[in-house]
Every structure is written in structure tokens, then in C-alpha cells.
Amino acid sequence: MPYVRVTMTPGWQRLIRPALRRTENELAEAVARDARGLVGVDSGDLKRTIKARGNRVYVGTSYWHHHEYGTRPHLILPRHKQALYWPGARHPVARVHHPGTAPNPFLRTALRRRRNPRDRR
């Protein structure tokens, strides 16, 4: 049976590093772009904070996981005052019964799309 001999050029890792880094950066930007397109928009604050830096994707809000994974119904109570009030409310209230939020997995979906480009769900 014939055999094949493979010989690697010395220092081959160093030669491919720039191409790998460029590909990683392009992939991170593509994931960030997909995530911005998939996130639900209310005020646009969450969408504006999705950025690619180098080969990583960052989301710059503290509440991104509420959108990604959803929330259960919960009670909202005032922390620093005696009542809650927001623009558009008829009057201050002592508590709010939040019905919960359905998950919108914008980050996981963006990652999955780039993991398998044929799967563009």
C-alpha cells in the first residue's frame, strides 16, 4: 500500500496566525451584526451596546440576559422611595406585578447561524 509523507514548513503556525486572527475578527463582527438584527427594540439601548472588539462580542447592558433567557412573573417593589412612578403612569404605585418576559435568544441564535451558515433560522 502506498504511503504519503507530509512535511510541515518550520514555523508554519506563525505564518497562518494573521489569517486566523483576521477570520476570527470578521466572525465576531458577523455575530454582533446578526445579534443586533435579532434583538427586540424598545428604546434601542440594548441594540446599540452590542459590539465586536477583536475576536469577541460584547453586550454593554446589565439586563441583556433578561432578553436572552426571559423572566418569570415577579413583583417589583420600590428600592429607594416609597412608591414607583414612570412617565405615562396615572399615579404612583406601591408595587407592580410584572407578568414576566418571554425569552428572545438573540445571542444564541446569532452564534448558531454563524456556526452553521446553512442553518439561517
Image (cartoon, rainbow, N blue to C red):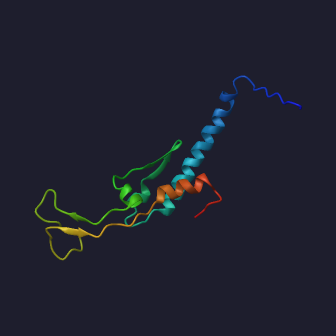
Q: Residue at x 63, y 38 (%)?
A: 20
Q: Residue at x 15, y 70 (%)?
A: 93
Farthest residue, direction bottom: 90
Name the spot of residue 118 as percent of width and height, x first. 65, 59
Could you tell whether 85 is left or right of 65 in the image?
left
Which of the 4 quarters of the picture holds residue 16?
Answer: top right
Could you tell whether 119 is left or right of 108 in the image?
right
The answer to whether residue 79 is above or below residue 96 is: above
Name the spot of residue 56 as percent of width and height, x first. 50, 44
Name the spot of residue 106 as percent of width and height, x first. 47, 59
Could you tell whether 59 is left or right of 2 in the image?
left
For the C terminus, give its image quadrant.
Answer: bottom right
Farthest residue, direction left: 82
Q: Is residue 86 visible?
A: no
For the N terminus, give its image quadrant.
Answer: top right
Farthest residue, direction top: 10
Q: Is residue 37 visible?
A: yes
Q: Residue at x 62, y 43 (%)?
A: 23
Q: How many marks?
A: 0
Q: Residue at x 59, y 52 (%)?
A: 115
From the viewer's side, name the closer residue of 70 and 110: 70
Which of the 4 quarters of the picture holds residue 4?
Answer: top right
Could you tell whether 4 is left or right of 120 in the image?
right
Name the spot of residue 44 as percent of width and height, x first. 40, 62
Which of the 4 quarters of the picture holds residue 100?
Answer: bottom left
Farthest residue, direction front: 1
